[in-house]
Image (cartoon, rainbow, N blue to C red):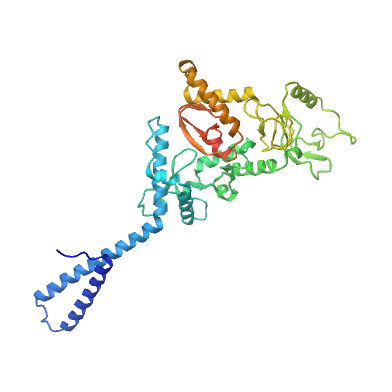
Amino acid sequence: MAGYMDPDSAALVAELVLQDIQSIASTHEGKSRYGAPPSDEEIAFQVQADNARMILSDFRLAQSIDRALDSDAALIIAAHAAEDDYRYATALEREEEPPEQSEWQRLMENHALANSIGATVRAHEPETGAMVFGPVGAGSSQGLRTACIICADRIYINVSVRAPCQHYYCHDCIRDLIRACTTDESLYPPRCCNQPFEERVFFPILSLQLRTTFQSKSREFNTLALHRVYCPTPTCSIFLGSSENSHGRIYCSSCYILVCTRCKQRAHPGPHCPEDTATIAVRELAEAQQWQTCPGCRDVIELNTGCFHMTCRCRTQFCYLCAELWKNCACPQWDEDRLVEVAHRRVADEMGEQAQAVRPFVFMRNVQQRVEELRNNHDCDGHWWHRRNGGAICEECNDYLPQFILVCGNCQLSACVRCSRNRL
């Protein structure tokens, strides 16, 4: 029985055989009669040479594949995981039973491996901030694809935008986010996983009108809320600028009026501002209803549910009881009735509205477990999300999600995709 020869040795033998055949062939040059058929010896040498060349070709191909696998292993894992994530999202969208977690997805949940893969993927990304995954073996980088983190649609490299957290957005979803953040300050600056986008990444794909609107709202939202001055004319109300360094008055070019930057009303004679009866009435109502005033922007805020840790739309975090900046007071962080209310609602979302009547003991046991979890983990320092199938209400925007909701593994907060990625 012939012994096994390793690939390196086989390639070396093939090279030596080719050299010997070429050496022998050179000694026979010019000795054969012109037009005469090749001799048996020459045919044998030709067959051996062809076999040797085939061995060398296979060896070089194997080396090339090995090098490709070594350098592209991270991309291959990420590509398979992206494909499986897309199949999972598609099944949920069609209200079908989602597939079980694949081995590729489990590999991506290994933080050390995921970080290594992320570094390799980023090294293959173009400078535009866009990157994609696609079918393994795709011949061109233009064919690589990934799933949009918001809509789960499959997108190519020229229609994807990479967030600083390495999530990917299609052009439609990034435009929707920019458009939303111009009307909802809680979404400004546009961000994913609490990391703001760089304007250069999304600006080229915006329309001229949306660019202009975004720049205008950026000027407004980047001004400290207490210093913002708006036109007091109800039919105008445009942002005029900051009260700082304004010399007491700002001119509205739309209404052709001067505005006092101290009282934020129409300019008036004399240094003393008249009392604003409407503002006084709102403050009195807020005090009667036990509403609180944000120390950042002075807006009146009502607590409907949850703990006393408030985050205003101006991004100021404060205590609802005393209006001090968060973690600068000794106030309790929870009202017991509100805590039970939140726990009750979350268990109802998990078990269904009828669970309390059908399985009252189990339902109340789960409510008590949620109460204890909320006491310990309500002030979540960093959300990590997992998907829960079934309808539920987003606790941030109050939208109802009929197919699935994202739940934080730390504080059990339920949120839609938009809020989990772009608001919290």
Which corner quadrant of the image does residue 58 belong to?
A: bottom left
Image location of residue 233, percent across then percent down: 75, 31
Q: Residue at x 42, y 48 (%)?
A: 78
Task: In the rendered view, tell whether residue 31 sits above or below residue 167.
Answer: below
Q: How far across and down, in percent of the image, does residue 167 sit? A: 50, 45
| Residue 226 quadrant | top right
Left or right relative to 39: residue 243 = right
Residue 35, compared with residue 238, is above or below; it is: below
Position of 37 relative to 93 (above/below): below
Going by the image, does 351 lie left or right of 196? left
Residue 207 % position (x, y): 57, 44
Nearer-the-camera pick, 248 or 354? 354
Quadrant of the rendering where the C terminus is positioned = top right
Residue 195 sits in quarter: top right
**Does the rendering let one see residue 224?**
yes
In the rendered image, the residue lying farthest to the right is: 270
Examine the rendering and report whether any part of residue 395 can be seen.
no
Tell whether 354 sits left or right of 295. Answer: left
